[in-house]
Amino acid sequence: MMRYLSVFLVGALAVVLSARAEPYRVETVASGLDHPWSLAFLPGGRMLVTERPGRLRLIEPGDDGRPQLRAEPVAGVPGVLSRGQAGLFDVLLHPRFADNGWVYLSLAHGTVAENHLRVVRARFDGTRLIDVQPIFTSQPAKTDTQHFGGRMAWLADGSLVLGMGDGNLERTDAQRLHTHLGKLMRIAADGTVPADNPFLQRMGARPEIYSIGHRNPQGLVAVGAVLYAHEHGSRGGDELNRVVAGGNYGWPVTTGGIDYTYARITPYRSLPGIVPPLVEWTPSIAPAGLAWYDGALFPAWRGSLFVAALKERSVRRVPMAGGVPGAQELLFRELGERIRDVRAGPDGAIYLLTDSAGGRVLRVVPASP
């Protein structure tokens, strides 16, 4: 494996990317997937993988013990709007999945002219989904098929957080409370609204809103009581944030990026009342998935956030000490592939999903057994 030292400019700060990568090897777990988006680990070494066009796939140990992709998709998945960035997004198991069998899916629902971000839950019986129930549907309906967000994470109290993008339409909707666009939402496991949501008593506000001012959040992970999220900027201004209830994360009134037309979006990089990012990436890396690693296989990587990057075709390791990010390590660029998701497996390995019509599930393990 090639090792190198790089320096990138992030805003006005130089961020040194460490060259001390742990030696590793990359194994292919499954291939031939159509834009795989998310991965969940089932008991017994099985995995569920979403494909953006609307399929849920099962990976299970074969007769030789090696993982194999089941030929037929999991039955019972509700129909999705699959066009542009719209499709089937995240898959997440209930924290007590072993007892109740609940699986949660986020997806684009409706038509190009009137669509929503929806969350459904269903019981997985090993081959199909049953008892499928919509538990959240974003409001109001929007047009076009961009900036859905779609990531989900469980908080320590058992509530579910969901990220939704601004739709790439009226940006300032991310600051308005009458719409779910450009927000993180928090709901209970059955879709009801927790009594302590921060905007619950605000006149005209959507009660599910947890934080505001997000452009297109596609990474969420809870580490103990701390929720981390990252989001796509425009031409630069990608952000890693520590999320607090009721927080305003700035879009579009503050950003480190500019528009795709090179026009200025706002003159402000920071303002009073706006929560500043922990990390900002300019030029954009296009962050897509987010994981927390505390496994045993890679001791030097413990206590780190892993950020999948589409544009950069990499994974950024961001070591965290006391909630403060350290020098980033640039990983897996030798693959030359857009990385849609990164997960920390129960076996201590790192799992990657590559974003293409012939996408793969990859497993990263130490170079020596």
Image (tube, grey):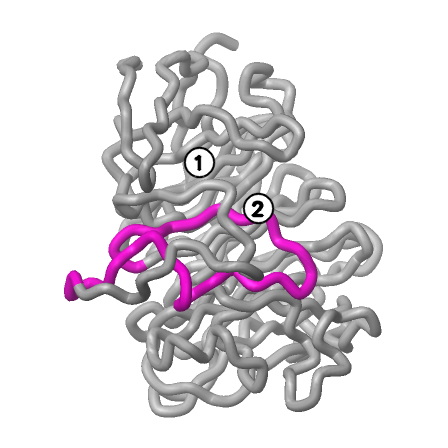
Q: Which mark is residue 224?
A: none
Check disc 1: other Cα within 10 Å, few if <14, some if 14-19, many if 20+: some
- Place residue 189 in its image quadrant: bottom right
By secondary structure, the bulk of the magenta-drawn segment is best described as loop
Spot occupied by residue 89 in the image (x, y as percentages of width and height): 47, 63
Residue 245 falls within the magenta-colored stretch = yes
Q: Badge 1 is on which residue?
A: 29
- Place residue 260 in its image quadrant: bottom left
- The residue located at (33%, 50%) in the rendering is 286
Marks 1/2 in contact by CB < 8 Å: the verdict is: yes
When the figure is inspected, residue 169 is found, relative to residue 357, above or below; the finding is below
Q: Considering the numbered disc 1 on the image, is that residue within a helix, a strand or a loop?
A: strand
- The residue located at (73%, 57%) in the rendering is 94
- Which is more toward the observer, 73 or 17? 17
Q: Is residue 128 visible?
A: no
When the figure is inspected, residue 276 is found, relative to residue 90, above or below; the finding is above
Residue at the limit of the structure toward the left, as seen here: 261
Amino acid type of the residue that numbered disc 1 sits on in the rendered structure: Val
- The residue located at (54%, 71%) in the rendering is 77
Check disc 2: other Cα within 10 Å, few if <14, some if 14-19, many if 20+: some
- The residue located at (49%, 76%) in the rendering is 181
Spot occupied by residue 359 in the image (x, y as percentages of width and height): 33, 48
Q: Relative to residue 66, is residue 172 drawn left or right?
A: left
- Which is more toward the observer, 218 or 120? 218
Q: Badge 2 is on which residue?
A: 47
- Start-end of magenta stretch: 234-262
Spot occupied by residue 325 in the image (x, y as percentages of width and height): 53, 31
Q: Considering the numbered disc 2 on the image, is that residue within a helix, a strand or a loop?
A: strand
- Which is more toward the observer, 359 or 256? 256
